[in-house]
Amino acid sequence: MKLFAAALALTLGLVGCGPVDGDPIRSGASAPDSVPRQDAVTVAQLRQQAEQNGSLAVVLYLGSVPERTADVDAALDSLQEQPWQFVTDIPADHRVTAPGGGRELYCLFAVSSRDTLFLYEKQDPQYPHQTGRELYCKQDGQPILLLCNGTPDVPDITAVVYCITGRTLDWSPRLSAGTSSPEPVEGVDDFSQHPTPGAAP
């Protein structure tokens, strides 16, 4: 009887194991023949740091390709190895390309898994208050890969986070002139140059 109770307890314990809220991406490092890198940083760690900073979104600039392309996988493969292991595990339905393709590759996600992340085609500057075509909308907290900005200095995507508290954030991911980092935006934590949580100022 004691053996049965122990087996039942073990079974129930395993059933209770699941993905950590806000960190649903499973790294390929869990494969038997792979070894996790010591510098591996999880979505949950980045989210926790951004939440402490009062931000609504996280952005990671992954790099740029020489020519405009619509192939996110090819763009990711052509870039140097990323310090964030979870990036390569982002599924196809969380990979978005701007209409006409792009050159800059970003990873984005809402800080809270309860908030909704939208991506819109950027509207004509003559109509700044109109929203372009919706390209992505999910409320699951998972990171996405975004390939955009086919022309330097001309952002073509608007990212919007709708917070359950009523706070709203919208911005266009783009690189600052003369730098290799995303343009600073209030409410968006940029960990591009700081792969270790807590390293960003």
Image (tube, rainbow, N blue to C red):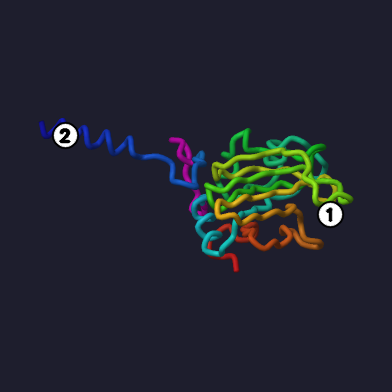
Front-most of residues 41 and 132: 132
What's under tag 1, amino acid-wise?
Asp
Q: Position of residue 23 (x, y in %)?
A: 49, 46
> In the visual, does 163 lie left or right of 125?
left
Main secondary structure found in the magenta portion? loop
Q: Residue at x 48, y 46 (%)?
A: 36
Q: Residue furthest left?
A: 1
Toward which corner of the image does residue 183 lie, by quadrant?
bottom right
The answer to if 73 sits in the magenta stretch is no
The answer to if 37 sits in the magenta stretch is yes
Q: Position of residue 7 (x, y in %)?
A: 20, 33
Query: Which structural element holds mark 2?
Result: helix
Toward which corner of the image does residue 171 lie, by quadrant?
bottom right
What's under tag 2, amino acid-wise?
Ala
The quadrant the C terminus occupies is bottom right
Query: Which structural element holds mark 1?
Result: loop
Front-most of residues 135 and 68: 135
Residue at mark 2: 5
Residue at mark 1: 153
| Disc 2 residue crowd, few under 14, some 14–19, many 20+, Cα 10 Å | few
Q: Position of residue 80 (x, y in %)?
A: 67, 48
Toward which corner of the image does residue 69 lie, by quadrant?
top right
Q: Residue at x 82, y 37 (%)?
A: 100
CA separation, marks 1 and 2? 65 Å
Q: Residue at x 76, y 40 (%)?
A: 98
| Disc 1 residue crowd, few under 14, some 14–19, many 20+, Cα 10 Å | few
Magenta-drawn segment = 29-41
Q: Residue furthest bottom?
A: 201
Counting residues from the start of the chain, the first of labels 1 and 2 encountered is 2
Q: Residue furthest right?
A: 126
Q: Mark number for residue 33? A: none
Front-most of residues 50 and 35: 50
